[in-house]
Image (spheres, grey):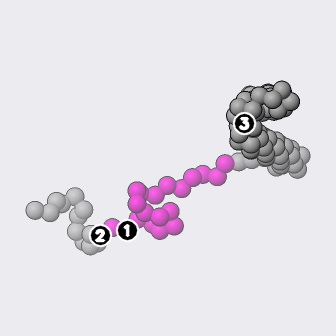
Amino acid sequence: MSHRPLVFVTGLAVGDYLLWNWSLNGNHDVLALVSGLTLPPLAVAWLWLLAMSVARLIARSARRSSGRAGRRGGETRREQPQRTAAPGLPLDEPPTSNTPAGRSSRKLAA
C-alpha cells in the first residue's frame, strides 16, 4: 500500500492550517473563514488515514511474525485437497440419485 494519500492529506492539512493562521493574523476574515471551515474535514481525513496506516503496519508485522514462527517450528505448510461437490449440494452430503435402483438413468421422460 502506498503512503502517498497520507503524505498528500498531511501536506494539505498543514498548508491549510498555515493559511488559516496567517489569515487570522492578517485580518483576512473571508480567507480565515474558508480555511477554518476546511480544516476539520482535512484533520479527520488525516486521522483516518493515519489510523489505517498504523493498522496495516500492525497486521503486516503480525503476519510476518506468525509466518516466521511456523517456519521455525519445522512445520511445512501443505495445502489440504479441496473437496468439490455437484453444484447446489453441500460438501458434507454425498450426491443422491432420484431414480429407482432398477431403472436406467439414461431414459428420458416423454
Q: Which residues are magenta?
A: 79-97
Percent of width and height locating residue 72: 89, 46
51, above or below 13, in the image:
below
- Can residue 42 be seen? no
Dot 2 corresponds to which residue? 98
Q: Quadrant of residue 41?
A: top right
Residue 83 drawn in magenta: yes
**Which amino acid, mark 1?**
Thr
Residue found at x 64% / y 52% = 80
Residue at x 49%, y 55% (from the top left corner) = 84
The residue at the point 40 percent across, 56 percent down is 87
Name the outermost residue toward the right.
72
Q: Could you tell me if the residues under marks 1 and 2 are in contact, i.e. CB atoms within 8 Å?
A: yes
**Could you tell which of marks 2 and 3 lies nearer the N-terminus?**
3
Q: Which residue is mark 1?
A: 96
- Using residue 38 as the reference point, say whether residue 61 is left or right of it: right
